[in-house]
Amino acid sequence: MTALLFLILFPLIPAVLLLAVKHDGARGVITRLAVGVIVAASIGLPWLMNAGLPVYFSFDAEWAGKAMFFIEIFLAGLIFFLGLKYKHYLTSVLITLQFALMAWYEFSLSGTVTIQQHLFLDRLSLIMAIIIGVIGGLICVYALGYMRDFHDHHREMPDRRPYFFFVMFVFLSAMFGLVFANNLVWLFFFWEVTTLCSFLLIGYTKTAEATANAFKALIMNLGGGLAFAGAIVWLAWSGGPLELKALIASPQAMVMIPVALLCFAGITKSAQMPFSSWLLGAMVAPTPTSALLHSSTMVKAGVYLVLRLAPVLAGSYVGAAVALVGGVTFLLAAFIAISQSNAKKVLAYSTVSNLGLIVTCAGVGTAAAVWAGIFLIIFHAVAKSLLFLCVGTLEHRIGSRDIEDMDNILIKMPTLAVMVLIGIGGMFVAPFGMLISKWAAIRAFVHAGPVMSPILILLLAYGSAVTVFFWTKWMAKIMEVSVLRTGHDPLEDAISYDERFAHWAHTVLTIGVCLAFPLVSSQLVEPYVAEVFGQAAGMEAGNLMLTGIMVALILILPTIAFPYQRKAGYVFGTAYMAGLNEYPDRMYDGSLSQRRKATLKNYYLAGIFGEEKFMKVGVLAGTCLLALMLGAALL
Amino acid sequence: MAYFKKSPWLIHYDGSSCNGCDIEVLACLTPLYDVERFGIINTGNPKHADIFLVTGSVNQQNVDIIRNIYNQMPEPKVVIAAGICACSGGIFAECYNVMGGIDKVIPVDVYVQGCAVRPEAIIDGVVKALAILEERYARAKAA
Amino acid sequence: MKTIAIGIAYVILAPVIGGLLVGLDRIISARMQRRVGPPILQPFYDIFKLLQKKTVVVNRLQNPAIFCHLFFMIATGFLFFEGSDILLIIFVLTLSGVFLVLAASASGSPFSHIGAERELILMTAYEPMVLMMLVGIYKVTDSFHFYAILESAKPLIVYLPGIFVGFLYILTMKLRKSPFDISYSHHAHQELVKGIMSDMSGKSIAMVEIAHWYENVFLLGLVYLFFGFSPVLGIAAVILTYVFEILVDNTFARFRWELAFRSAWLVALVLGGGNLIALYALMGGA
């Protein structure tokens, strides 16, 4: 238990230190050391626990509960005040309602409830903790270099880095708390801290747009928090269990309403369809924030909760509605991603889309579906974080985050370009993880029931086809080379060591997770699924071997084929331009003997897959499905 | 063994001509002559072609293009000048903008006469060109 | 062991069968146009000649990508006939396709670039139908494996008529037949100067062409699955399908990409989706 408390509380120390320290070098030292400790502790958890998983800890935590309630009062006051100050009154209203519910619970209901086990660690928590510790930690290291560059590029913005790093580490602390909490009231506390942290991070630059989007995120997540508080009050009032473990084990009919409310909270946090806009708005924040929100924290908290509830959702109408919300989100977000050329927006929509798939898995709630969902979380966290970090660095180097400007980076920044390619490959192509998880999801959906199965299969079939389109065209853009190599390009050297370290670590992880996939499955995911569902899920040995071989091949083949061509006597020529002469940099002799530049742009199919159109459809469909979900719970 | 004789792929380029020869080139593809019998394909892409078949003469506008197409064809390759304009400039030879036959720009291997050149003659020219192509391949291989 | 032998036999024989099929295709097409057409071995002559040509590349990335395209195409077919999970195999096929697109867009030629984009659109267009087909097959036979599906001896065509017709529709895309040959076509004279192949030459074309032969045989293997309960019927169906595709090829004008894309999705939704829904309604959800 000490290890869990250590992971929750330790990040607060560097957080406070970083808030106080203004010196850049000292900040670097503290951050790197702290991240080192967090990474070591999160990976070492199974050994530190010194006990078989899962373990539940019961102890007297009167004081902790009280402390949390006081912090909650403070935070509620803060949010209330901020809402008034920036004239986002809905924020103040939501926080008041939420606080009223919690106060009701604290003062009148909590006496009747006894909560034995406050903290726990099972294999899903362990997986989440490792993701938070490793990926989140690496992002903090990356932020050292990135934020320095960021303030060099944006001199007009106030340099509030101490505050930034403070919030980052608090965020990690809250996330650890969130995945270790068995006590729903504690879970709720950490849940609200992450909401607040993401609000502060999104609004970091204090521009009008950032503030507006930060409030958008805050309002939507407070809505989710309100549902969460509602669930707690309902459970306490109706005498239901306030512990996660007991809640999952409860018969469906008993707890359907609070479970639906909790799912609602999870859906807002994981930016599913009616609420997707907050995550897209969050793109205004500096890249480490986006990376953190998208890969290891925040949205993953949302899907974590829904995935936890999967056993209760299985086969119920609420579960069906949750699965449909996820499925519709998966499809529509992928549609919209086609029409985007802003790299960060493509990443954002793809996150929304993939989270949709995870939520669908949770909604289906069978052992196989949950197995797929957990792997989606793992692979998505690693690959998406890698992509965000690369795009962030690219943006500072080439001065654009538009995919159309990413041709020739293979010449200018070869290492980074290959990393982006690996990241994209990790997102959608066999044999990398995301695809394998998608494969497992399809297999799970086949058994989702006579009505749900065909619907989910259709959503998935169209959605994954579209996924191939928007990722491949990005890769294709990176493959485009029109300038000649002119010796060593200094662009890549300018990347800071912290950023480079984070890139390399992520790249190794992206490939490493695919190679270690059988191990992760047999040691962590399969036992978890077996323990929760009492039945086995996983992949046949033959398929496991096959994917392993393919991962190796896809790394080896290009490296063999690349030098071979020189030996084979290939000669270099110019590109075909309908007989016109071509010169370096894709210049050609145009009409009237003018030398012109040819530019190539990707297809965006905006007429078919427009953002506006599908966002509207998504909000409408999502809202209806959520209404259905809550309705189904009440019946 | 070389396979150029069995699979000659051809790119046709029309310089400045009256289009008479071009029609005859296309006539070779029609059921009457059906050059695909011999594996001949009219590719339209220099990078795929073995034979560069030019009709019409060279002028100031197309000189670069002829050179470019020729350069983009991978070795081994041959050039056929089909029709009198391609051979020498023909009746356009004296025009202010015409530079003359194709051999003013790139090395021509086979000259096929006629105004307009007859399909039989074109096919005959291609057959001649194939012998050169094979020889060129053999020489390159030996070297 | 026996299945691995069949897989290896595929790797060796598929180019022979694929090449002969293309040769046959060219003769039949020629006869439909009242021509004589080339000898049946013409595709092989073409490949041998291409291997003797010099290979010109625009940049260094092109050929490794084409090589991977070929390799994973062979892997697709090998795994299919070896009896691996077809769902996984379809993703290997996608991987192979992705490499082709990357190879084409590496060159920087506008023709090649548009070819690559259209190829991607085609991939997006046919993918839903392929997935639905596999799920349909799984629903009926409870397996994703070639031999297990055959052993189940279920007449798939009876259960999956809509899916089969939908598959024929997208098969035209995969075989690169008109009206869907918008990214590259095996016909000589066409728009986009052969699309994705614009900037390939010599060995590169040979590799793409051989990959296409492998793909054709694999696709016909999928057709065979629908009639696998009776081998005679299966082979007859495969031949008929191929002739039918040739007929379609010679009787249709090329579609625009919008029409190709929209119609493929609509066909998949109506025939594929409809068939799936009916299947689940009749067979239950287990």
Image (cartoon, rainbow, N blue to C red):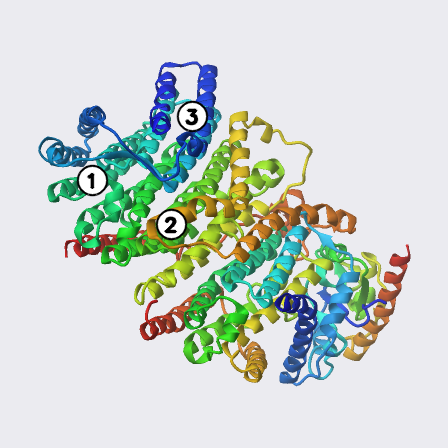
- The numbered mark, 2 or 1, whose residue comes first in the sequence reads 1
Q: Which amino acid type corresponds to the residue marked 3 in the rendered image? A: His
- The numbered mark, 2 or 3, whose residue comes first in the sequence reads 3
**Real-space Cα distance between discs 2 and 1?**
22 Å
Circle 3 residues within 10 Å: few <14, some 14–19, many ≥20? few
Q: Position of residue B48 (x, y in %)?
A: 71, 62
Residue to which mark 3 is pinned: A154
Q: Is residue B29 shown above or below A22?
A: below
Q: Is residue A610 among the parts visible in the rendering? A: no
Label 2: state its secondary structure: helix
Q: Is residue B11 shown above or below A101?
A: below
On the rendered structure, is A586 left or right of C169?
Answer: right
Identify which residue is drawn at 64% across, 63% down.
C211
Q: Do callouts 2 and 1 mark residues in contact (Cβ within 8 Å)?
A: no
Q: Is residue B48 among the parts visible in the rendering? A: yes
Identify which residue is drawn at 35% across, 54% down.
A332
Q: Viewer-nearest of labels 3 and 1?
A: 1
Pointer 2 indicates a residue of which chain?
A
Residue to which mark 2 is pinned: A529
Identify which residue is drawn at 59% across, 47% down.
A479
Q: Do callouts 3 and 1 mark residues in contact (Cβ within 8 Å)?
A: no
Front one among A227 and A83? A227
Placement of the C terminus of chain A among the 4 image quadrants: bottom left
| Residue that extends furthest to the left in the rendered view of this protein | A108
Identify which residue is drawn at 76% across, 60% down.
B58
Residue to which mark 1 is pinned: A242
